[in-house]
């Protein structure tokens, strides 16, 4: 089973997935790393300090990796995961807090603005709805990696047990940053 962990850059995907990898021993594919390491991109956007993923190559590579492991739980961690997985968990973060995290990473002002606007406008959440069967949402604002991990564990455990109806707290739509858009 492939579950996507997605969200705007800076919302905590990598940190929490590494935590869950250690704690639960879940198989995690860090998609952004794989794209860069295996050159699964069409070009390098120097201005935005990013690579443009070749999603067809990415899908093909993931099929190879997952082949024969259909009964194994695999977490696909990336801001692109919702383009591939049918079930996704979208991590959200209050834009002012997101801005601080991205500044700490040394992102350019333009890249910071682009990402906080995307978060405020629910861009990844909307895309997830367009591409995925099941979408869940977690507000990571003010939460530790461990707390966020507990929320993800609850969602995954309920999905695996077939009791998704108990996950109403994670149904998308409760987080709204739109008032923060200038």
Image: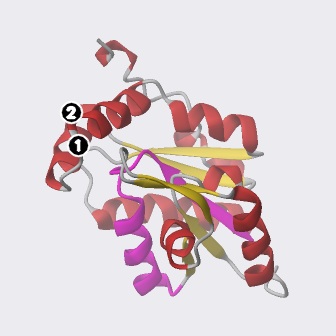
Q: Which residue is mark 2?
A: 96
In the rendered image, the vertical position of residue 107 relative to residue 53, given as above or below: above
Q: Is residue 175 magenta?
A: no
Q: Quadrant of residue 94?
A: top left
Residue 114 x %, y %? 36, 32
81 on left or right of 101: right
Q: Quadrant of residue 162?
A: bottom right
Q: Which mark is residue 166?
A: none
Mark 2, residues whose alpha carbon is within 10 Å: few (<14), some, or many (≥20)?
few
Q: CA distance from mark 2 to mark 1?
A: 16 Å
Q: Which residues are magenta?
A: 1-25
Which residue does the image show at 54% across and 27% down from the upper left?
173
Q: Which residue is mark 1?
A: 108
The answer to whether residue 94 is seen in the rendering is: no
In the rendered image, the vertical position of residue 27 relative to residue 177, given as above or below: below
Which residue does the image show at 51% across and 87% down from the upper left?
25
């Amino acid at each position: 089973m492939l579950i996507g962990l997605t969200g705007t850059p800076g919302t905590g995907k990598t940190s929490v997935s590494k935590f869950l990898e250690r704690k639960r021993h879940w198989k995690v594919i860090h998609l952004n790393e794989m794209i860069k390491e295996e050159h699964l991109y069409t070009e390098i956007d120097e201005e935005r300090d990013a690579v443009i993923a070749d999603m067809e190559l990415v899908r093909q590579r993931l099929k190879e990796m997952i082949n024969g492991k259909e009964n194994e739980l695999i977490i696909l961690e990336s801001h692109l995961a919702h383009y591939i997985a049918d079930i996704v968990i979208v991590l959200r973060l209050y834009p002012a807090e997101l801005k601080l995290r991205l500044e700490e990473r040394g992102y350019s002002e333009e890249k910071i603005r682009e990402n906080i606007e995307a978060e405020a406008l629910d861009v990844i959440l909307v895309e997830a709805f367009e591409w995925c069967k099941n979408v869940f949402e977690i507000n990571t604002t003010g939460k530790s990696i461990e707390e966020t991990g507990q929320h993800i564990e609850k969602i995954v455990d309920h999905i695996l047990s077939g009791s998704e109806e108990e996950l109403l707290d994670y149904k998308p739509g409760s987080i709204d940053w739109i008032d923060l858009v200038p």
